Amino acid sequence: MVKKIKGEYFLNRTETIEYLMTAYQLKWCNTKWVDGLVVISSEDMKGVRSRVKVSAYKSKKSSTVRFRKKELDYEFIRRLG
C-alpha cells in the first residue's frame, strides 16, 4: 500500500513497477540492487530502453524498502521526456 510520510508518497517495489508501467506506458520494467542503489530498467512502447538509479528508503517501523514517488517521476521525466 502506498504510504504518505510527511507529505511525500513512498511506494514498495511492486507498486513502483505497476505505477511506472501505467504512468509512462512501459512494455516492461524491473528492479535490482546495484552498489547500494536500486536500478530500474525499462523499455517504452517505442522500443527505447533506459536504466535509472534511485535511492531506497526504509521507515523505522517497517522492513519494507520503499521508493520516493517524486524521485521516480523526476528521473523518468528526465530520461523519457
Image: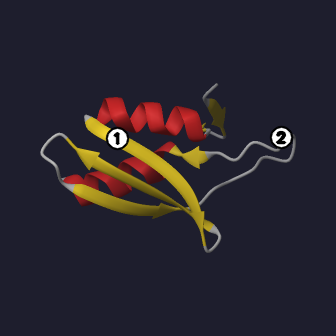
Residue 28 versus residue 57 in the image, above or below: above
Residue located 21% across and 53% down the image:
80
Residue placed most toward the observer, 7 or 78: 78
- Residue positioned most to the left: 46
Q: Is residue 73 above or below residue 56?
A: above
- x, y percent for residue 30: 46, 47
Indicate which disc residue 28 carries.
Answer: 1
In the displayed structure image, the side of residue 40 where residue 6 appears, left or right? right
Asked if residue 54 shows in the view, the reply is yes
- Of residue 72 and residue 39, the one placed in the foreground of this image is 39
Vertical placement of residue 6 versus 41, above or below:
above
Q: What amino acid is labelled 2 in the image?
A: Ser
The kind of residue tagged 1 is: Trp
- Disc assigned to residue 62: 2
| Discs 2, 1 touching: Cβ within 8 Å | no
Quarter location, residue 55: bottom right
N-terminal of the pair, mark 2 or mark 1, is 1
